[in-house]
Amino acid sequence: MHQRWQKRKSQLPLIAILLFIFVAFTILYNESNIPGIHHRNSPPSGVDGGEVRPRSTFHGGDFFSPTPPQSFGSVRNPPVRLDKHAICNSTVKYSGRRAFPAVRRAAESGVRPPDRKCDLFSGKWIFDNKSHPLYEESQCPYMSDQLACHKHGRHDLGYQFWKWQPHGCNLKRWNSVEMWEKLRGKRLMFVGDSLNRGQWISMLCLLQAAIPSDQRSITPNSELTIFRAENYNATVEFLWAPLLVESNSDDPVDHRLSERILHPDAVRRHSSRWQHADILVFNSYLWWRQGPVKLLWSDEQNGVCEEIGGQGGMELAMEVWADWVAGNVDPSKKKVFFVTMSPTHMSKDEWEPGSRGNCYGEKEPIEDEGYWGRDSDMPTMRMVGEVLRQLGSKVTVLNITQLSEYRKDGHPTIYRKFWETLGPEKLADPASYSDCIHWCLPGVPDVWNELLFQFL
Ligand SMILES: *[C@@H]1O[C@H](CO)[C@@H](O)[C@H](O)[C@H]1NC(C)=O
Ligand SMILES: *[C@@H]1O[C@H](CO)[C@@H](O)[C@H](O)[C@H]1NC(C)=O
Ligand SMILES: *[C@@H]1O[C@H](CO)[C@@H](O)[C@H](O)[C@H]1NC(C)=O
Ligand SMILES: *[C@@H]1O[C@H](CO)[C@@H](O)[C@H](O)[C@H]1NC(C)=O
Ligand SMILES: *[C@@H]1O[C@H](CO)[C@@H](O)[C@H](O)[C@H]1NC(C)=O
């Protein structure tokens, strides 16, 4: 892995970017044991072993009814479970097949009336060290070593002090007690990849101080991690499902990185876990950006896969997901959110033409209003917009892309825990291993949660 990166580093920037993402996910692979996410009785995160691989022992247990959920779509028998050993006997070109040719229209379909006079996602960042950060990094016992930038040596803390100011209105002030009241007796679940997990950790950090320590607990990290607040009879959970549909990446620890194989028509293994949640926050994007994926249809007998580009694969997955939403969500009982793509800042050239490097060393947001980086794929955004539009009021978009685009200063860069050994030549060139994908906490994902708060 390390060597391959070195060898190809000088090639096309696109390859470099893809490889960087690949490296980042390889790092993720080892990030498994999210240090800091531990039961209140476990040792403090300073002595965690990032290398220790937890076994996935938590399978819902008493939390879920033992009876299988209602049948889903047209898939009668559950498809073979994919894991890192899954293989395609052979691969052919994508046949054009679709599981759900048209998303079932929401009852009150059609163009959604604007629910508010003001677009909360259009605005600017204002330096405000009085109102932000909303918590201290060191005060959050659930902090991840991947996101704790100050702890890992970042001394310019400006990234913590920015407040989001929509044009034309103000955000309702964050209030964790008010948020807990909204969550009383409910399950809030985040479903997606490591970016969504960052938002979930941010939510725990925002909320935890309001709960006495003997009233809260967290299950060991696995596919589904559950934070419980006894006094509110509420949970804040994270389900790892980076491609939404079933795939060989579904184990947050033990998955293959080189090849994505997915069931384009099966989401039931995941939906059986998320269907009980009252508030669902989904995301999916970066895992589709590493080149073509392989589709293994549930009824395929001979292990023949079809290969399709990432965006095409994501569209199929979104359709299956949307079919679940259309058939299972009553907006008066369940709230569903979809978080749009989280931008990356891997080429400084994009905001400072002619320069080299990436987000490493950036201390201020981008001021150029409307700035849009090239890794935030517009055709994908349009596809997502179309799928969500068809779901009408059953889903609310958290369109965090534009506002996060401005925050080139918000990434961990070298100030996080790295699980691979960094050789001297890497250490001499910090930009070469900077993480310009995830976000420091406190930071940008806190604002995503402040926005979520506005809609509850
Ligand atoms: C806030 O920022 C201003 C300007 O940089 C600085 O003078 C002040 O000391 C800061 N206040 C706090 C509480 O950090
Ligand atoms: C706790 O919340 C669950 C729903 O998440 C509900 O079924 C249960 O009755 C609640 N228990 C109490 C004691 O309120
Ligand atoms: C792959 O093909 C072989 C024979 O050609 C068959 O025995 C095997 O079951 C196939 N594998 C899968 C996963 O279908
Ligand atoms: C999100 O906002 C951008 C503008 O910032 C817009 O182009 C895009 O269509 C929006 N996406 C969705 C899904 O609403
Ligand atoms: C992941 O951790 C294992 C040890 O558990 C190590 O051998 C491997 O090199 C690490 N891989 C990366 C990419 O960090």
Image: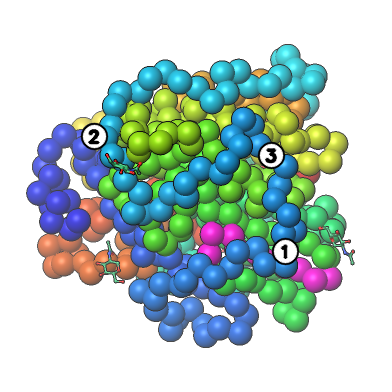
Q: How far apart are the two marked residues, 3 and 1, measured between alpha carbons?
A: 20 Å
Q: What SS does tag 3 mark?
A: loop
Q: Nearer the viewer, residue 48 or 444?
A: 48
Tell me the quarter of the image containing the N terminus: bottom left
Picture quadrant where residue 39 is located = bottom right
Q: Badge 1: few (under 14), some or many (20 or more) residues near its Cα, within 10 Å?
A: few
Picture quadrant where residue 231 is located = bottom right
Q: Earlier in the sequence, mark 3 or mark 1?
A: 1
Does 61 sit left or right of 234 as displayed? left
| Residue 227 lies in the magenta-colored region | yes
Q: Badge 2: few (under 14), some or many (20 or more) residues near its Cα, within 10 Å?
A: few
Camera-near label (2 vs 1) is 1
Residue annotated with mark 1: 63
Q: Position of residue 162 (x, y in %)?
A: 56, 50
Q: Nearer the viewer, residue 112 or 238?
A: 238
- Give the main secondary structure of the magenta stretch: strand
Residue annotated with mark 2: 14
Q: Nearer the viewer, residue 2 or 363?
A: 2
- The amino acid beneath tag 2 is Leu
- The amino acid beneath tag 3 is Ser
Q: Position of residue 373 (x, y in %)?
A: 38, 32
User: Which quadrant of the frame does ligand 2 lie within?
Assistant: bottom right
Task: Please tell me which residue is depicted at 33% across the width and 33% down the height of the picture.
Answer: 304
Q: Position of residue 34 (x, y in %)?
A: 47, 67
